[in-house]
Image (tube, rainbow, N blue to C red):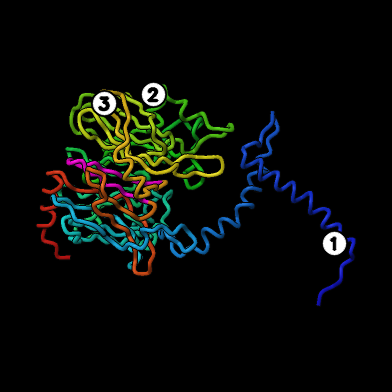
Amino acid sequence: MFKKIEIWVLYFVLLMGFPITIGFGVLVRQEIEGKTKHGAIDISFLTKPAAYIARLPERFITSFPTINQLRVNQPWHENRVFYKQNGFDGTPNLYDSYLLLSRYDGNKKEGIVELIDLKNFKVLHTWNPDIDKFNKLINKIDEFKDVDINNNNSRETLTHPLLSKDGFLFFNTPPLRKIDQCSNLVFQNTHDIFHHSIEEDLEGNIWVPSSMYPQSLPVEKFGRTNQSEGGYFDDAIVKLSKDGKVLYEKSVSQILIDNDLGYLLFHGGNGSFELDPIHLNDIQPVNSNGDYWQKGDLFLSLRHKSMVLLYRPSTNKIIWKGTGPFYHQHDVDILDKERISIFNNNDKQFFNSSKVDGNNEVIIYNFRTNSYSSYLSDSLIENDVRTPTGGRSQIVSNGDLLVEETDFGRTLYFNADGTLRWSHVNRADNGGVYNIGWSRILYLKDDIINVNNFLNINRKC
């Protein structure tokens, strides 16, 4: 059956294996610690593959046995107490308000958007677009070859849905898509790789972050490789008409360079070039004049810089740069003429991992007093709100607070006194909790008018 081997051969293999094992471990350690260069000597060509090989078992364990990539409570993951909850739990709102809930339906195995009446938690309308059908059209468009077409019905959430004033629904997958009340495609814009937030200004135009390819920046500084091949993320702010026509586009990297902030792009640690230094995740258009901004300005959230900018497109000037007590933040909102709110993920890169340092926060910045404060922080701590990525918050007119804990499929609504009024967990019949995709609360007068107009549309789908 098996041939006998000489004992000296076994000893030789063991003897040689020992220094090889030690050497391999040294290469992995050097790569992890970032100590791959000394003078003109660079061993990164050895350390990178060694670290990659060392991580293969971890990748196998965390990805191969995954039941569904959009399920957030795999059997071997953290089992949080609220995962026993299914759907809404608590007391409905007393005032007219609606939730535009984007979620992955674990029963249907598809991404959907629901319009929910928060006075009774009833679903008034559901959008369930055929992403596979839409993707077949993308394959015919050569300009969009950089996008992962594997984002199909069974893998997709419909990010940050926006119900427009004329009754259509916008969402990001990518690409940026617009559908009618029956989930039929109106258009899908493939000009850039659109991502993250979608906001509408007073004129009905849409503001969306994008990644430009080819990059708009000098090739000798930023290269021309696309993102899927490890190229530079040339994040941009884009304004589109309600019909999907690009009206304005500006590279955020170029904005930083023009405003003498180019050092934020070229200071990569360990002598390496940072491919995604900005990570623009929210564009908040300013729709009225305030004491510290003008109509037409934009608030920009740069996640990877833990920075918020107030930018004036008309003059290409950064009016204000905020780097306060927030880390890897999302979702900037204008509260009044002198205050903004920021959803602070509080996600920090420690020695061996990135994690939420305690809990998420809703930070308020007051321009008049130049001061930061935390809103209902005890409530977020008590309810263990701590999404590492994503996350949304909205302080409504009466002081109540809506928070989306994106990575854990949970939405919470707090009364102004900090008590939890209701929460929602996106749980399926199989017990799995699945992703949600940047939902929004509709409560302003114009929002209510838009919803009522939409509900009065003759929908024969």
Q: How far apart, in angstroms, are the residues tagged by discs 2 and 1?
A: 66 Å
Drawn side of residue 43 relative to residue 71, left or right: right
Which structural element holds mark 2?
helix
Residue 345 location (% of width, % of height): 39, 42
Amino acid on which the number 3 mark rests in the picture: Ser
Which of the 4 quarters of the picture holds residue 455?
Answer: bottom left
Label 3: how many residues lie within 10 Å, few (<14), some (14-19) or many (20+)? few
Residue 267 location (% of width, % of height): 51, 29
Query: Which residue sits at x=12%, y=44%?
Result: 445
Q: Mark 1 points at which residue?
A: 10
Depth order, front residue of 168/34:
34
| Residue 457 visible, this orientation | yes
**Residue sitting farthest toward the top:** 260
Amino acid on which the number 1 mark rests in the picture: Leu
Query: Which residue sits at x=21%, y=45%?
Result: 242
Label 1: how many residues lie within 10 Å, few (<14), some (14-19) or many (20+)? few
Drawn side of residue 214 relative to residue 29, left or right: left
Task: Give the quarter of the figure containing the C terminus.
Answer: bottom left
Which structural element holds mark 3?
loop
